[in-house]
Amino acid sequence: MNTMTYKGYTARIDFDERDNIFVGRVLGLRAIISFHGETVSELRSEFQAAIDDFLRDCEEQGVSPEKPASGKLMLRVPPEVHGAALVAAQASGKSLNQWAAEVLKQAAHS
């Protein structure tokens, strides 16, 4: 997956062969923010403008802009998975939170 990042927001980038343009969509938000450009430079500029517009709109409306992630993650897993993860964390000398954060980071970046 190709991505761009700006001010903490990440967009997925795809190429539309039919229209011969790059298309981007900001990930992790309820709001749908998309943009496009014919070149990478134009695409990056449009991405930055879309995020700046989003932040400006939030400010004008007096609302806090939604962030892609708060840093808090609650999961529901089967008890046997929870137990196995706890054992793996303890075996590596880490808390379950530390261990899970490392595992998720590795999985997200592979």
Image (tube, helix red, strand yellow):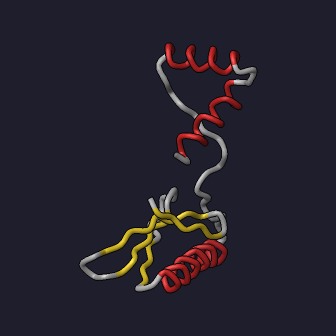
Q: Nearer the viewer, residue 42 or 51?
A: 42
Q: Nearer the viewer, residue 31 or 48?
A: 48
At a point 73% along the width and 24% down the height, the residue shown is 95
Residue 45 lies, in percent from the top left, at 55, 83
At a point 54% along the width and 45% down the height, the residue shown is 108
Residue 77 lies, in percent from the top left, at 49, 24
Residue 38 lies, in percent from the top left, at 40, 85
Image-based side of 27 in relation to 15, left or right: right
Image-based side of 43 in relation to 48, left or right: left
**Position above or below: 104 against 66:** above
Residue 15 lies, in percent from the top left, at 36, 72
Image-based side of 70 in relation to 18, left or right: right
Q: Residue furthest right?
A: 93
Q: Nearer the viewer, residue 45 or 75?
A: 45
At a point 66% along the width and 71% down the height, the residue shown is 62
**Position above or below: 10 against 72:** below
Q: Which quadrant holds the N terminus?
A: bottom left
Q: Residue furthest left?
A: 18
Quadrant in the picture for residue 5: bottom right
Q: Residue furthest front?
A: 110
At a point 60% along the width and 60% down the height, the residue shown is 66
Q: How many marks?
A: 0
